[in-house]
Each structure stands twice: as structure tokens, then as C-alpha cells.
Image (cartoon, helix red, strand yellow):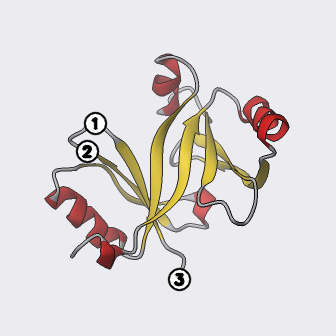
Amino acid sequence: MTAEDLGFKLRHVGVAVPSLDPTTETLSTLFGYKVVSGPFNDPIQKVSVNFLSKSDTDVAEIELIAPLSEDSPIKSILAKGGGAAYHLCFETTDIEQALVHAKNNGCIIVSPPVPAVAFDGRRIAWIYTRSRQLFELVEAAV
């Protein structure tokens, strides 16, 4: 399969934050972004998230991700220097084949597909590239 066969589409930019409210307020005040969904508490991912957008014509949303518990994986990202964009999320029409495609192109599968609260139970997976980039894949809505 090729990338074109998998229907990849940029969905959001993930930003690690210590708490959702202060950054949500900043993005609203400075740039006019509004919460379009969330907050969602996801016990599987151990995070709380908000999705923000400026308009329906935005190419991608901003996902703010805050730790939900002390053992949240976001804690380690925040410990490296505060809030920062750390992943891009791509929607795909076939998450299983997208993972095969990623592995065939030298990626490590960090997390196999699991249901995500923020995506109405659609599955997400995480991959890490040879160039040290983290990407999230999410199943397209049917």
C-alpha cells in the first residue's frame, strides 16, 4: 500500500501543557481560538485534552494535552522544558495497514491501536520515526 491508499489527512497538532485552562484562555485571547470539543479525560492515555479551532476552515485543530495522573506520559514531556508541540496526528482510512506501512518505512510502533475517548472510541496508535519524530494515527470516522 502507498500513503495515498491510506487516506492520510492532518488532523491536529498536539501540545503538552501542565493544565488545560490557562493555555486555552491564552489561545482564545491572543489568537481567537475556541474549544470545539472537550475537555475529555482519557484514563487509557492518562491525559485530559481539549481541541481548539478558529473556524471550520482550519486545516487542523490544536490539541492541548494535560496530565490526568502522576504517571501520565505527558509528565516526562513537560519535565523537559514546559509546554511544547510534540506530535502531529494524521487520520487514516485503515489504521492496521497504516501501521504496516509505517513499519515497512522504518518506524517503531510505540503503541498499538487502542480506543480513544476524544475520538468517540475510534482507535489511535503511536509511531516513532527514524528522524526521531512522534506521530499519532487515528481511524477515520465511518
Q: Which mark is residue 100?
A: none
Instruction: Give above or below for 2 relative to 124.
Output: below
Give the residue at x 69% y 65%. 57
Residue position marked by numbered label 3 in the rendering: 142
> Nearer the viewer's eye, disc 3 or disc 2?
2
39 on left or right of 5: right
Quadrant hosting residue 84: top right
107 on left or right of 8: left
Instruction: Give the residue type that dot 2 points to.
Output: Thr
Q: Which mark is residue 129?
A: 2
81 on left or right of 2: right
Residue position marked by numbered label 1 in the rendering: 132
Give the residue at x 85% y 36%. 29
CA separation in Å, label 3 and label 2 = 28 Å
Instruction: Give the residue type that dot 1 points to.
Output: Arg
Q: Is residue 122 visible?
A: yes
Instruction: Give above or below for 139 relative to 5.
Output: above
Q: Position of residue 137 (x, y in %)?
A: 41, 59
CA separation in Å, label 3 and label 1 = 31 Å
Instruction: Mark 1 and mark 2 in contact? Answer it, CB < 8 Å.
Output: yes
Q: Secondary structure at mark 2?
A: loop
Q: Is residue 72 visible?
A: no
Instruction: Give above or below for 21 relative to 111.
Output: above
Give the mark nearer the N terminus: 3 vs 2. 2
Q: Position of residue 3 (x, y in %)?
A: 29, 69
